[in-house]
Image (tube, rainbow, N blue to C red):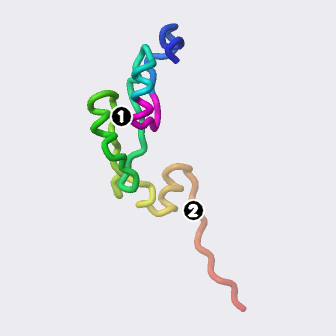
Amino acid sequence: MEELKAAGLARSIGVSNYLPEHLDWLLETATTPPSINQIEFHPYLQHAGLIDYHKKHVRLPPIRSLPNKTTTPSSSPPQQLTLQHHRTSPSPPTAPKPP
């Protein structure tokens, strides 16, 4: 990756899901440190100490919050979504057939 960056084929080098021990090794051996480490972070997976480590060594991407209920497609009825995105009309409801 460093050769690609030196050749102008990459603007920066990033890593994903590196823990402090991986980053320590990388920072010792690489001539170009990673510009970002993208990690999975949510209420069920919180890496203890990893955020503090990143504040000192490697930038983290902005943490996105969960989407607002009013902006998710699931807040609209399916027929509205169909009309809005596919420009088709929903089929009329059908009456059950008599026995």
- Determine whether, in the image, residue 82 is placed left or right of residue 74: right
Give the Cα distance between marks 2 and 1: 42 Å
**Label 1 secondary element:** loop
Residue situated furthest bottom in the rendering: 99
Q: Residue at x 44, y 55 (%)?
A: 73
Q: Quadrant of the C terminus?
A: bottom right
In front of the other: label 2 or label 1?
A: 1
Q: Position of residue 2 (x, y in %)?
A: 49, 14
94 lies left or right of 58 = right
Q: Residues within 10 Å of mark 2 (few under 14, many from 20)?
A: few
Which residue is the extreme one toward the right?
Answer: 99
Q: Is residue 19 in the magenta section?
A: yes
Residue 64 in percent (x, y) is at: 35, 44
Segment tinted magenta in the rendering: 15-23
Q: Which mark is residue 26?
A: none
Which quadrant holds residue 25?
Answer: top left
The reply to whether the magenta stretch includes residue 91 is no
Name the residue beneath numbered marker 2: 90
**Relative image position of residue 57 (x, y in whole percent):** 31, 27
Q: Which mark is residue 61?
A: 1
